[in-house]
Every structure is written in C-alpha cells, then in structure tokens.
Amino acid sequence: MLYTEMDNITLAKLALISERARKEPKFQFTSLAHLLNEGFLKECYRGLGRDRASGVDGVSWKEYGERLDENIRDLVARLKMKRYRPQPSRRVYIPKDEHSKRPLGLPALEDKIVQKGIARTLEAIYERDFLDCSYGFRLNRSCHQALEAVDKTIMKRPIYYAIEADIKGFFDNVSHEWMLRCLEVRIQDTSLLLLIRRFLKAGYVDAGQLVLSTQGTPQGGNLSPILSNIFLHYVLDLWFEKKIKPKTQGECHLVRYADDVLCLVQCKQDAQAIEQAMKERFAKFDLELHPEKTRVIHLGRNERARAYGSVHDVHTFDFLGFTHYWARSRRGYPFLCRKTSSKRFRRACKELNAWLKTVRCSAKRKEWWPILQAKLRGHYQYYGISGNSRSIGRFADLAKQIVYKWINRRSQKDSFTWEGFRRYLKHYPLPKPCIAYRLYPPSSVP
C-alpha cells in the first residue's frame, strides 16, 4: 500500500478519535500507538522545518530524507518492538530578558518525527477538551486572539483587578509523575504512555555533559507544547472553571497562553483570595508562583487620573510582550491601550544590532538585505496590533539608524550620508510599520 493511502487512513482515524472525544468527554482511549505507522510518520517528517538546527545526532532534514523509506521502516519496527529510545536533546540558550537566558532542547531529527506524530494524536483528543480560555499552541488560535480576549473582557465587563501569575520555571520544573497522571485521565494505551515517559526521561546534553531529566519538559520539541497544555488544562483551567468561579462574589475570567496566565476579576476580595488559592494549587503539583512577578493590579478606569502628579506609577500589567495601560480616546473616553513592553523593545533592538554587526562583513549587502526585511516584517506582524502604532514606528526609526550605522562602518570612510541612505531606501525599501491585527474597526474606536 502506498504511504499516501496509509496516511489517509490514519488521518481518517484521527478524525474519528476527535469526534469520539467530543461526544464522550470521559472516554479513555486504549489503542493509539498503532497510528504511528510509516505513512503517518513520513507526513510528520515532511511537516518539519527543513532548515532547523540539528540535535546531538547532527542529522539534518535533507540527510535523513535521502534514505527516507529505509529510515522510517526501521523506525516503525523499533517502535513496534518497544526498542525505540529517544536521544538526549542538545541544550542551547536564547535570551529571555536583559539578565537571563531561556534553555531550549533541540531533539534529534528522528525524535522530532515521533514527537510530531504523538503531538498530532494528542491534539485530536484534547482539542475537544481544552477550554476557551486557553490560546497557546492550539489550532486556529494565536497570541493576538488572547490579547483581544483581554481587551474585550476589560472593556466590556465590570473588571477592576488583574492577577499576573508567573509560574516559576514551568517548563523546567513540571512533575513527570503528575504529567503522566494527567494523561491517564484520557489515555490508557500503555505503549503510548511508555513512549511519552521515555521522552520525558531522555535528558539533555549541555556543554558536552549528559544530564538526566527527573522533571520538566524542555521547550524546543514538538511534544512539549501539547503536554504543557494538557497539564495546565487539569491543574489550572478546569480547576478555575469548576472550583473558583462558583465561589466568587463578582465576575472573574481566565486568559492563558501556554504558561502565561492572566486572571481578570471584578472584586478586590476575590482577587486576593484567587491569588492565594493559585499559590496553594500550584504548590500541590510541585510548582511555585514567582513571589516577585505574581501580583494583584488595580484596573480602575480612573487610575491614570489618580496617579497623575503623584510619586506612584500608573498601575499597568505586561502580557505576551505588551504593556497594557489606560489611555483617553479622541472623544475623552478611557480605553485599554497597549504598547511593546520596554524589555521586549530593548531586546529587539539589541538583537538587530548584534546581527547587523556580525553579518555586515561576512556577507554582501544584497545577501543579508532580504533577511533584514524579513526580520522587520516579523516584528510588525507580531507587535503591529491596535494601539501600538507608536512603538512599532519608533522601532522602524531605530532600525534605520542601526542599519545606517553599521553600513558606514564597513570602512573608515562613510559609504553613505543620510541623504544618500534615504535615496538608497527608495530603491531598496525596508518594510513600513503597519497594524497587522486590528482589535476593532476604525469606526468603533471610542
């Protein structure tokens, strides 16, 4: 049978699994591992990024594909015999903020294929279970939709307090045993659970040293996002919906993007009680809310007026890289506005500056100019949201200044004057800042 036919059969089975998960919320699936067949894993291979960094095996997407049929056939045989064991991830670090770095795990390419297959199987089940408050790493959901939910909830509902909840080192500290217990609510396939356990225990290689994992699910793989959503679905989302909401005096709403949590509450007493309850809830599952980054914020619409002229700052909160604050519309009405957070803004400028410093002499301008254009478009696509035009415009101006500076440092003599640089940009323009995601049509602005 051709792999395309096998793949169509697997996709049809996933659709049936998804439908059954929707109709029977308490049904436990006992036969899932067989879905990881040759056709399905070949499709998973083709769905991987072709230029991504390799893991400890050093095998690239292209190299693995040169003997794809043979490699996948051997992989499926090892999966069936339970002889397949994931390799440790290669650990790298990327900037998190100005003072710390975020660890990422880069799995071997074969492990990426299996992880993607498992992730798609889990998504077929849990997409029907996840609540509307969850937005991270889900089909047809995005960070902009989470920001829109925050905006509409605060603007249209009687919300006067927000709880910023920061889970301390979530991806590095999540309990393996609690994770598996969450999975066992819906999955009773011992083969699939064994495979997931092996991925959790595979460990990582850091600076040439093998480190075994006793907790955590490292970011960087295809499996980590869905596992984190499943864990937080049971630990936070369902608990908040069934235990917290019925006990509050006023309204309360939860918005979660992966491990970024924001709780919007009407009453101060409820906000304080929920904050304490969340600390106790996460402690039960061997996690901790960051004591300095978790706080209750007052969101009264007159907050800016009260803070004006005082030594206290206006109460603002950060969510998904944006600082939210109250502003006044042209008609004088208060409305929730947002701008790129100062940390994210400085980091974006530093990263662009460091990249241009490296690339200006290692490649010709015609080679790195399209990459520069892509970087700017990516920035505007994410940060180009209603109310943030000033920040993205400022970033565009600073980006031009950085580019001008490093082009002129290719030699002792300046290669451009500002007038000459402006003429150059007319022939080779940089992307203009624009609003890519509108929270409301222009006619509805208060």
Image (cartoon, rainbow, N blue to C red):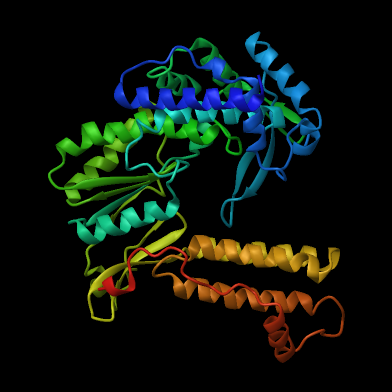
Q: Quadrant of the N terminus?
A: top right
Image coordinates for residue 217, horizontal then vertical, percent = 55, 31
Q: Is residue 148 left or right of residue 396?
A: left
Hey, which quadrant is residue 205 in on the image?
Answer: top right
Q: Residue at x 40, y 29 (%)?
A: 126
Count of numbered badges drawn on the protein: 0
The residue at the point 69 percent across, 66 percent down is 372
Horizontal and vertical percent position of residue 415: 82, 84
- Taking the view exactly as shown, the residue that stands out farthest to the left is 249
What is the residue that sits farthest to the bottom in this orientation?
419
In this rendering, does residue 358 appear at all?
A: yes
Within the image, what quadrant is residue 360 found in? bottom right
Residue at the spot 82% in from the left edge and 85% down from the top edge: 414
Residue 446 is drawn in which quadrant? Answer: bottom left
Foreground residue among 158 and 78: 78
Q: Where does the image place residue 172, in percent across and percent down from the top left?
A: 54, 34
Left or right of residue 270, residue 284 in this image: right
Foreground residue among 193 and 265:
193
Q: Is residue 330 rendered to the left or right of residue 415?
A: left
Whether residue 298 is visible to the viewer of this picture, yes or no, is no
In the image, farthest residue toward the right: 412
Give the residue displayed 47% in from the left and 57% down from the top.
321
Q: Nearer the viewer, residue 150 or 290?
A: 150
Residue 267 position, x and y percent, is: 17, 51
Residue furthest out toward the top: 81
Q: Does residue 377 lie above or below 83 as drawn?
A: below
442 w.r.t. 271: above or below? below
390 left or right of 261?
right
